[in-house]
Image: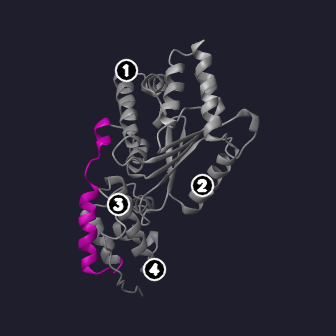
Amino acid sequence: MLRSVDTRYDPLVAETPNPGPALLKRRLGEELRRLRLAADVTVAQTAAELGSSEAKVRHLENGRNVPSKPDLTVMIGLYHAPAEVHHDLEELRQTATRRGWWSSYRLPGWLHNFVGMEADASLIRNFELELIPGLLQTEAYAREIHNLGQHLQDPKVVDRMVKARLRRQDLLTQEQPAELRAIISEAALHRLRGSDFAADQYRHLLAMADRPNVTITVLPFAKRLHQSMSGGFTLLSFPDDSSAPVAYSDYAFGGQMEHEPNVVAQLSEVYEELAELALSEQDSAEFLGYWLQGEQT
């Protein structure tokens, strides 16, 4: 027999100032999952009650999607949550459906979700093997990268994607900027050599590294094998304790968010190990200066 849940959701607890819709969706999903577990209801039982797939329930709980008003009512009823909880979550649901700035750029779904979460992050940790991190790319570099994508050959699509990438970078220079810690493999710097935009990109990296909220370090070839040979990844942390960190990784024609706490924790450990292998901030700046000087001679 299902037991009644007396816990009340308080939207004012640990609230991020002006949270965006992506973070609100995730906060709603986390609360629905907490209520489900407290009521001893399985994902399969919830899916059966909604007349949907288990995947839909998981997408609702990890913040990928927002439940409809009828679905929320069914879930609250199934979990035996009090009326005031239903009221608070319905208010949160309505707020979470508002559009973020990224909606106007018609980003693919996998990127739309990531950019929404990124916009609310207070700390961004990024490791890249072959690419300059998106938040540190110049317009010319970003345009060249997007032109290489076979699925983005339409100049209008490329232009839209480049503008979206540049708009994302505002979070590093806004009044209360996010903190970025970027580790860049030496391979990404080698890929720039001889291009028309190499000097500008090296110069931009040096300028961004001077910002108090940006840390850029280089993982040199001299360190040989390391813990993330298979690819780069990004870790997003948020300014309140109610939202757990998430991870994101790119692949050739898409990307994937990772919400599982154990996986995110393991990636965090990998990041810290990579940080230990990377050059110091000062040595990294000198390293970048060396590449810049090579392009200017």
Chain-order first, disc 2 or disc 4: 4
**Eye-nearest disc, 3 or 4:** 3
Q: In the image shown, does 264 or 37 lie closer to the viewer?
A: 264
- Give the residue pinned by disc 3: 16
- Give the residue pinned by disc 4: 40
**Eye-nearest disc, 1 or 3:** 3
Chain-order first, disc 1 or disc 3: 3
Magenta includes 108? no
Distance from label 2 to label 3 (Cα)?
22 Å
Chain-order first, disc 1 or disc 2: 1
Tell me the kind of residue under disc 1: Pro
Chain-order first, disc 2 or disc 3: 3
Q: In the image shown, does 177 or 20 lie closer to the viewer?
A: 177
- Give the residue pinned by disc 1: 155
Residue range in magenta is 79-105
Distance from label 4 to label 1 (Cα)?
52 Å
Element on which disc 4 rests? loop
Density class for disc 2 (Cα within 10 Å; few <14, some 14-19, many ≥20) is: some
Tell me the kind of residue under disc 4: Asp
**Eye-nearest disc, 2 or 3:** 3
On the image, the x and y values in percent for residue 56 come to 40, 59
